[in-house]
Each structure stands twice: as C-alpha cells, then as structure tokens.
Image (tube, helix red, strand yellow):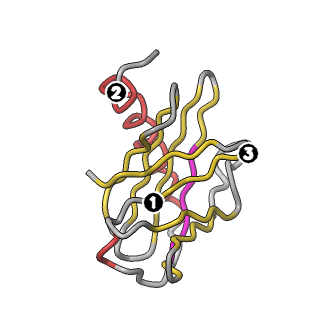
Amino acid sequence: MLNRHLKRTLIFGLFAVVSLGAAASAMACAPADASLAGHYYLEGVTEVGSELLLLSDGSFEYTFAYGNMDQAANGCWSRSEDSVVLISSSSSFKSRPFRQLDLKLKKDKDLVFNMGNGVEGTYVIQ
C-alpha cells in the first residue's frame, strides 16, 4: 500500500502533465463559486490517490491513480445547490476518465465522490 506522502508525490507529477495540457487548450469557463476553490485530496478509499484542483475562474484539474491505471482530466466546474459538477474537456489522453462528474457538496466544503458499488471517497480541501 502506498503511503499518503508517496501518493501525493506521484499525483503531483500527474498534475504537472495535466497543467501542460490545460495551458495548451486555453478553455473558457464561467467564473465559479470562489468559496469552493482550492486543492482537494481524496480520502477514505484504500489504494487510491486522487487530487482535484478547483480554480475560481471555473476551471479544474483532476488526477486519479489506482494500481497501474492513471487518469487525468481538466475542464470547467460549477456549483449546483448541494453538488459540484465537473465537465471534462480533456483530449490529451487516450480515454478521459469522465465526461461529467457530479460530486455531493457537504456543509464543510468536502466533496463526496460516489465511485459505484457502494464505495465512496471524500475530497478534502487542504
């Protein structure tokens, strides 16, 4: 099992790759709820490393690593009542991890990620 520090180091490298792709694609997003902007880490899921960067300009960067599967995406995000919706515009990877991802917003700004099969993780802002 990867320790938390090693996961973060690996994921940070993926963020660098996504950032290069995001800069090259110059997407235009609507400004989003600045109170939710920040750097989130996924917690509560064994053997998974994931980070989510929500920017106040409405753009996001996302990485997800599980075993030998690494995924990354970027695009636009928005808040809708008790959820945060990510719309991927990624095209730099063979398969983007999602077209749209809905995360449930908790009162403390944490974001719940329903991974299916009863598995949930929580993105916690750092």
Q: Earlier in the sequence, mark 1 or mark 2?
A: 2
Is 110 above or below relative to 18? below
Is 45 above or below relative to 6? below
**Numbered mark located on residue 111 in the image:** 1
The kind of residue tagged 2 is: Arg
Residue 73 colored magenta?
A: yes
**Residue 41 location in percent, x, y?**
38, 45
Q: Secondary structure at mark 3?
A: loop
Of discs 2 and 3, which sits in the foreground? Answer: 2
**Residue 115 location in percent, x, y?**
64, 46
Count of numbered circles in the view: 3
Q: Looking at the picture, tell me which residue is in the foreground, 22 or 79.
A: 79
**Numbered mark located on residue 119 in the image:** none
Of discs 1 and 2, which sits in the foreground? Answer: 1
**Residue at 67%, 64% in the rendered image:** 100
**Residue at 35%, 52% in the rendered image:** 124
The kind of residue tagged 3 is: Ser
The kind of residue tagged 1 is: Leu
Q: Which residue is mark 3?
A: 95
User: What is the magenta range?
Assistant: 72-78
Q: Which residue is mark 2?
A: 4
**Residue 19 location in percent, x, y?**
43, 51
Q: Earlier in the sequence, mark 3 or mark 1?
A: 3
Is 36 above or below relative to 101? below
Is 14 above or below relative to 35? above
Q: CA distance from mark 3 to mark 1?
A: 24 Å
- Relative to 35, 51 lies left or right: right
Q: Earlier in the sequence, mark 2 or mark 3?
A: 2
